[in-house]
Every structure is written in C-alpha cells, then in structure tokens.
Amino acid sequence: MAMKPEEILRLIHAQRGSAICVPTMTTAPAWRTIAPDDLSVTCVGFMGGASSLGLGLALARPDRRVLVLDGDGSLLMQLGSLATVAGAAPRNLVHFLFKNGVYHTSGAQGIPGGLTVDFVAMAKGAGYRMARAIHDIEDFKRRLPELLKAEGPVFVELHTGLAEQTPMTAGGGVPFPQQVTDLRAKLLKPRARS
Amino acid sequence: MPESIPATLIIDTLKDTFREARAAVAAEVSDPPRHSHLGWILSVPDTHQKSVLAALDKEEQIRVVTCATEDEATTIAAGLHIGGEPCVLMIQHAGLYASVNTLRGVAIDGQIPLFYMIGLLSREKDKAPRESRHSMVRYCEPLLDTFGVPHARLEGPDDVHLIPEYYRLSRARKGPAAVLVGLETI
C-alpha cells in the first residue's frame, strides 16, 4: 500500500533535529501544520526549485542538515538540478522525493512517464552518494535514522499516495518573502539595534 | 568605443565586493557563516565571460558552482542569501530569457537581493545593444526594464566600479540588479 505523505512528514519532523527543511507543492500544506514555526522555507511560486533552494542553503550552512521535501512533477521541471546537486556534493543534503505519479495540485494529471520514471537511477547516474526507493512505511521507519545521518547528497524516492491537501485546497500560509526573512533571522541572529 | 575588460580586474573587483558584503553581514548579525572563501559565483558558462571563468578555476578564495540552468543558479543564490553568503550570478543574455519566471518568482516576488553579471554575446562593438541586429542582444535591456530590474553596462575597465555599486543596490532594494558585460572579457 502506498505510504501516506502526512505520516512520512510527521516521522521526518520527529527526527530532524535542527535540520532546515524545504517543502514544496503538496508537501507544503501538511508541513506547515506539522512544523508550524521552525527552520523551514517553502518553495512556492517557482515550481521545481526546491532542490536548488536546498542546495544553496546546504552550501551556506554546512553545520546543519538540509532536507528537501520534493515532488516528482516538480523535480521533472528542473531535472538537471540532480547533476548540479551531485556536482556540488553537499555532504549535509538529503533529497526526499514524494513520488505519486501525478501533478496533484493542478488536478492530478499524470506526469510524463507516470510511475515508471526511475528517479533513483537518475540520481545515482547524476552522482548522488546514496539513492534508494522506499515503498513501505515500516521500511521507512527503519531506515530514516540512517538516512538523516548519511553523508550526502542522499536521494530517497518515497512511493506515496496523494496528500490530503494541496496548495489549491489549503492556500495561505506565510508569504514567501516573510519566510525568507524569518529563516534568515533564525540562522544569522540579527543584532538588536540600539 | 567600448573596450574589453581583463579577467584579473573583474576578479579583484569581485573579491573586494565579497569582502565588503561579508563585513556588512558580520556587522548586522551575531552568527554569520564562517567560511574560508570570500563568496560564490553561480555560473551557467557564458562564452562572453569565459576568460573570467577560466581564471576563477585557479582561485581559492571564490567558490564556483556550475549550474545546469539559470533557474537553478537563481534559486541556489536565494538559498545562499538566506544562509548569509555573498554570491554573484554569471550568465548570458539567453540564460536570462530562459529563466524569467524564476527571476520573477524568486528575486522580484521573493524580494531576494540577487546580483547578475550578464554577458552580451554577439554585441557589435560599434552599436548600442538596443540597435544590435541580433535579437538576443537587442532584447536584454528592454526585458530588464519590463521587469523593473535596474541595470548598467560595463563598457570598459573604468566601469568595474559598477559591480560593487549594483551589488549594493540589489541589497538596498531587496531585489535583482544587473550589470551587462558589453564586450567579451580578456
């Protein structure tokens, strides 16, 4: 049975420690409910950019883990980012791909190739240090601690069903510019003005 | 008439720009990133600036990330900015056209300061870019105007002061700013 995205996100949140998280599209509404006030920035308004946004954060802050919560339709929009991430080789980046085979947000139209697209092979071919698929929630629970500690870049293809909400059914949330300001302040700690 | 700019002059100017940017961040925050390098170049290789890119290969104080697309370069720059790192995007006019949605979504709507150096490949030495017979040269400044991106042209060695000026401008306006590299660097 396909895994529930919300259950996966709750497990990641419980074990992420001080990691920075970059959700996008259908992982975004659930993530802001599960982790409402923390070290996250949502890729919104530039579909396909989650892996690159995560890469920039990982390069800037090698002292922290960065977890990208990507979608299959999103990744296809900037598939070359797999090679760019692998080339930059951030040891602190874990790239989770929520694979459901459709563009859920726009009405669940099938992505090119549907569920047959092998993102694990692509990530391995691009040069990620580790890439694997997980189909079962019990397997995910077992492997998650290792995945969060492994030397990156790590790629994890998660076979999921559809999320309960999408950005279209659960709009709102903190606007992207405010998320940027908030996360930057949490990471850099601005001095108080006298 | 415009002149080509030596790569060493551009790299020295970039180093000064990064030093100033790091000092500005360090003055504002109590937990700035601590790296041994000065800053980052995000590049989708540009024929027009290839002498700079070649010289950067030997530079230890500037890190270069070669990106597959300008969309990626723009979004990686956003992540570096959030993390407190100074960076410059080096792309070509065609790459600007390819990445306008990311320019809009990340730099403009996202209010993220991003500084671009954009090569005007095929620009004729005796013509203003808007009069070029090549559409890829001709459309660059009007496109930046359409998106409200302030820009200036590097037309020779005396213009490199525009690099730190427009870098600062991107920070001051919390959005994109660009300099256009008029002739191929040497």
Image (cartoon, helix red, strand yellow):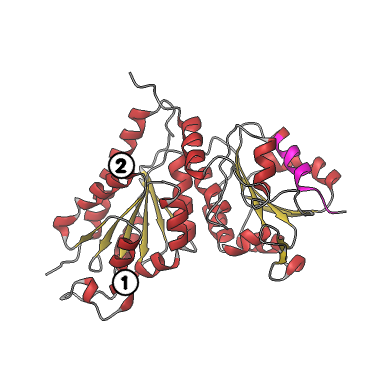
The residue under label 2 is B172
Query: Residue A183 appears at what percent x and percent y?
Result: 51, 36
Question: Would residue A176 appear left or right of B141 to someone viewing this image?
Answer: right
Q: Would you say residue A61 sits in the magenta stretch? A: no
Assess disc 2: are there few (<14), some (14-19) or many (≥20) residues with their C-alpha within 10 Å of its C-alpha.
few
Question: Would residue A145 appear left or right of B80 to someone viewing this image?
Answer: right
- SS category of the residue bearing label 2: helix
Residue A145 appears in view: no
Of all residues, the one furthest to the bottom in this rendering is B133
The disc labelled 1 sits on which kind of residue? Tyr
Question: Would residue B90 appear left or right of B132 to someone viewing this image?
Answer: right
The residue under label 1 is B139
Q: Which mark is residue B130?
A: none
Q: Residue sitting at 67 percent across and 41 percent down?
A: A31
Q: Give the total number of marks visible in the rendering.
A: 2
Q: What's the chain of the residue with tag 1?
A: B
Using the rendered view, name the quadrant where residue B99 is placed: bottom left
Q: State whether residue B115 is above or below residue A77.
A: above
Q: Would you say residue A12 sits in the magenta stretch? A: yes
Query: Residue A160 appears at what percent x and percent y?
Result: 78, 53
Q: What's the chain of the residue with tag 2?
A: B
What is the span of residues highlighted in magenta in the rendered image? Answer: A2-13
The disc labelled 2 sits on which kind of residue? Ala
- SS category of the residue bearing label 1: loop
